[in-house]
Amino acid sequence: MRLKSGLLFIIILHPVIIFSQQLPDGYDGVSNLQQQVWMNKRLAQTNSGYSNVQGTPLVFKEFHTGNFYFSNKTCISGKQINYNCYTDEVLFSEENNTYTANSENIDYFTLTGNEDRAILLFKQVFLLSEKKRVFMQLLYQGESILFKRYRKEFLKADIDKPYGQNRQVDEYNDYHEYYVMTGEQEPVLLKPRKSSLIEIFSDKSDLMEDFIKKEKIDLKNETDLVELVKHYDNI
């Protein structure tokens, strides 16, 4: 598979399909954009190396159907998309070729999840702590926003090292983080401990602590985190 990158323009064949999740509105479907891509050798080498390691730097092993929502308020639907969590790059597959999209022009993209009719909506956000833009899944959006950030850690084989972990091959290790955005603040990392919650929700910390205790909220449980942020918005 050849990997190409650059400014991505795609042809749309049908309108946006909405399944079980509300998707961004105010975006017009387009049908006549010119496709412009350029070869990027560095990315081509990275892609060819996927088969030499255990795991993948991508959200899904295979590309999934999804939509692009661009900053000029246009959208393109029904494309094969994936996200490289290790390099923070949005990929697009067509005719056995893989391209890297120009992320600067993308507000959102969607991926069909592994569950039937599930849609994962990713939003581009700026992380002040890392001074860069990344895409994170929107889990909840009200007055506050809860994000899920998919991460990949690259681990080198260490079978020959005296104090290694007996890792036979190079591998990508999956993990994820949750970020919360309240008001006009930047998204901040929500660590699975009470001190992090108190810092983020400092204006209502006592009420939030009471809610956690009463409802037995598990800060490592995704569903509980959604309920937690919803409760913050409602008090």
Image (spheres, grey):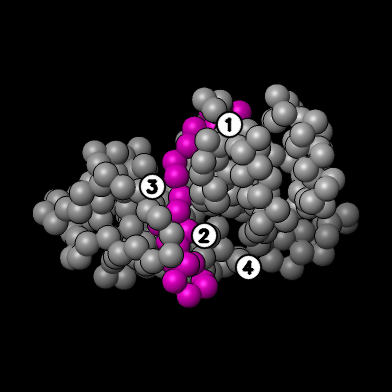
The numbered disc on residue 182 is: 1
Labels 1 and 3 touching (C-beta < 8 A): no
Q: Residue at horizontal 66%, vertical 56%?
A: 223
Q: Which residues are magenta?
A: 110-131
Question: Above or below — where is 82 with respect to 135?
Answer: below
Residue wearing tag 2: 58
Q: Earlier in the sequence, mark 2 or mark 3?
A: 2
Question: Split into 4 quadrants, where in the image is the C terminus?
Answer: top right
Report the amino acid beneath label 4. Gln
Give the structural element (helix, strand or loop) at label 3.
Answer: strand
- Badge 4 density bin: few <14, some 14–19, many ≥20, Cα 10 Å: some
Residue wearing tag 4: 54
Labels 3 and 4 touching (C-beta < 8 A): no
The span from disc 2 to disc 3 (Cα, nearest Å) is 17 Å
The span from disc 4 to disc 1 (Cα, nearest Å) is 38 Å
Give the structural element (helix, strand or loop) at label 1.
Answer: strand
Viewer-nearest residue: 114 or 25: 25
Q: Earlier in the sequence, mark 1 or mark 2?
A: 2
Question: Split into 4 quadrants, where in the image is the N terminus?
Answer: bottom left
Q: Residue at horizontal 49%, vertical 54%?
A: 84
Residue wearing tag 3: 108
From the top left corner, tell me how far across and down residue 55 is, in percent.
61, 66
Viewer-nearest residue: 223 or 70: 223
